[in-house]
Amino acid sequence: MALHLIKLCVGADTIDDLREWVSERSLIAMAAGMEAHSSHITRMIPKRDQELLDGGSLYWVIKGQVQARQRLLDIKTFTDVDGISRCELVLGPEVIETEFQPRRAFQGWRYLTAEDAPRDLKNMGEGTADLPMELRRELAELGLL
């Protein structure tokens, strides 16, 4: 079973903000002759990288709710210009909407087991994806979704 990461999506107020950022990063990668992807740089390096790369995703917390995920394609370590070890999380170009799942603020990233990961929106039943985001948020907060 895959292991996932969860992280706050700082600077994004909506999934559309995240999608715009991902699209820009994908275009930059393609312009450099690489495959379309986005990446996120973090200081901490996951020790369970093989489990993460076996079908794992990075789940994004936007405005206190897990709302989306991107597939983890690779995890690269490097040393920056200041001599500090860093980690590049290489992410797939598709932003996949998930059911809302409340999360308190935290620093960095955390591991997320497959059992605790929110379902993809498309797997939540017919018509769920068609509901307005605010209505889905309210229904999730009431425990009805």
Image (cartoon, rainbow, N blue to C red):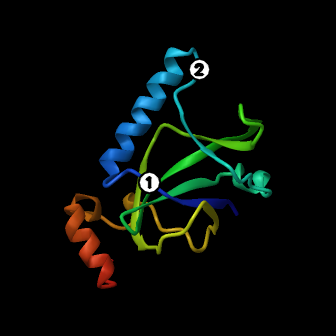
Is 10 located above or below residue 74 in the figure? below
Is 74 located above or below residue 25 in the figure? below
- Residue at left 60%, top 60%? 108
- Residue at left 76%, top 36%? 78
Is residue 43 or residue 144 the one in the foreground? 43
Residue ID for mark 1: 10
- What type is the residue that disc 1 sits on? Val
Marks 2 and 1, how far apart at CA: 26 Å
- Residue at left 62%, top 67%? 112
Which quadrant is the N terminus positioned in?
A: bottom right
Q: Position of residue 12 (x, y in %)?
A: 36, 51
- Residue at left 54%, top 39%? 92
Which quadrant is the C terminus positioned in?
A: bottom left
Residue ID for mark 2: 34
Question: On the rendered structure, is 53 left or right of 72?
Answer: right
Q: Residues within 10 Å of mark 1 (few under 14, many from 20)?
A: few
Total numbered labels:
2
Q: Are marks 2 and 1 in contact (CB under 8 Å)?
A: no
SS state under label 1:
loop
SS state under label 2:
loop
Question: On the rendered structure, is 84 left or right of 117?
Answer: right
Q: Position of residue 7 (x, y in %)?
A: 54, 59
